[in-house]
Image: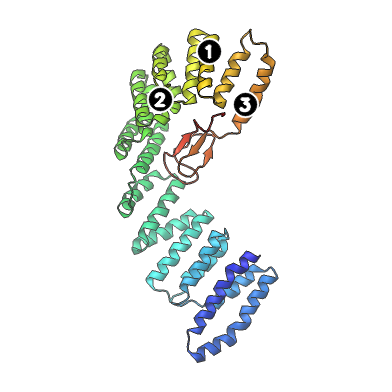
Amino acid sequence: MNELVWLLLPAAAASGWWAARRSASKAQERRARTTPAYFRGLNYLLNEEPDKAIDVFVQLLEVDSETVETHLALGSLFRRRGEVERAIRIHQNLIARPALDEEQRANALLELGMDYMRAGLYDRAENLFLELKEMNQHVRKALQNLIIIYQQERDWEACLRVSEELEPLVSESLGLARSHYYCELAEEALRRKDTEKAVRLLKKAARAEPESVRPTHLQARMAMESGECRKAIELLHAAVEQDSSYLSEVIGDLRTCHARLDDLGGLRRYLEGFLDDSADVAVVLALTDLIMEMEGEEAASAFITEQMEQHPTIRGLLRLIELNSSLPHVKAGQILVGLKDHMERLLAERPAYQCTKCGYSANTMHWQCPSCRSWSTIRRKNEPDEKCR
């Protein structure tokens, strides 16, 4: 309640400042007319009737060239507080006034569009931002908000069109975003079994951002589907060269391809090349599984024990417990099994991925951060996040 008082009092104070700027005769007339209303509004606040108080204070602020900014600020404050319906009411009331000039109307349209976005009314917000673009007012902000809307609606064609218009107006390249838009369209084409269109789209994605790993991985997946395992392996290696942190995401596909070629030894040699440069637990676990399959459980246990001495991780220790609890010479097998259960629960509570830009945590891989909407910023958590000491 106190917060609302402090929010609305500036609006009422602005009304008094506006009245003071009038001529003496008009000031006297307004004081006689608005002072009772001002105290009536305060009374509504004290009686916990904020809706009535808002109506009174908005009426105090008669819309003219000197009070438009106050209306805009008041609506913006309500939106930031999460009271979107009140923000919409204020901005709609402002737009309905015929006395606004073009710039003032544009400011009100922008604020109302942002109100609608906050309320999830994307179709209404879209219409307002398109109107602003046609008016050549707040074009950059309008285009930025349109991209947010189209991404939310998964209208990737529209995202591509708007990003082309927006890029000259901002100081950063939008190539990475466009690359992901093409990839999204390519995945839709693949779901429809339209391979030719998917290939064309992935080529455009690679041109839009040559360092983007997603088009390369999708091309590898397509090669796997068509049985071209050697080509798929080359593409997967290329993806890792583009972004070494992405290795953990392609290990499963690499294993599938090498298994089809009866070349698990080749995969082992490839992964061993990363042990000196990286403490990626996914590499250690993949090698442990390969060694167990090729040489047996004892060799796998010895390998992962050595790795955990150098780079202890929760997932690595959990795998070590699984191996040791199945070996006949381990006398404390029951204790290890109990410890394994506890560690599994602990690991399940830890998000496996995190956004490098905003810190958003997730249990699954996202190409676009659900929080800050940045592309290619979600990464699997590795060292030192998973270190035990």
Residue at 45% across, 27% down:
248
Percent across and percent down for residue 192 are 41, 33
**Mark 3 Cα-neighbour bin, 10 Å: few <14, some 14–19, many ≥20:** few
Question: Which quarter of the rendered picture does the C terminus lie within?
Answer: top right
Q: How many marks?
A: 3
70 relative to 329 in the view: left or right: left
Percent across and percent down for residue 11 are 55, 73
Counting residues from the N terminus, which is met first, the one under dot 3 or under dot 2?
Answer: 2
CA–CA distance in space, label 3 to label 1? 22 Å
CA–CA distance in space, label 1 to label 2? 21 Å
Question: Which quarter of the rendered picture does the N terminus lie within?
Answer: bottom right
Q: Which mark is residue 277?
A: 2
Residue at 54% across, 34% down:
363
Which is nearer the eye, 173 or 253? 173
Which is closer to the viewer, label 3 or label 1? Answer: 1
Q: Amino acid at mark 3?
A: Glu
Q: Amino acid at mark 1?
A: Ala
* Residue bearing the label numbered 3: 344
Instruction: From this view, report whether residue 191 is shown above or below residue 370.
Output: above
* Residue bearing the label numbered 1: 302
**Mark 2 Cα-neighbour bin, 10 Å: few <14, some 14–19, many ≥20:** few
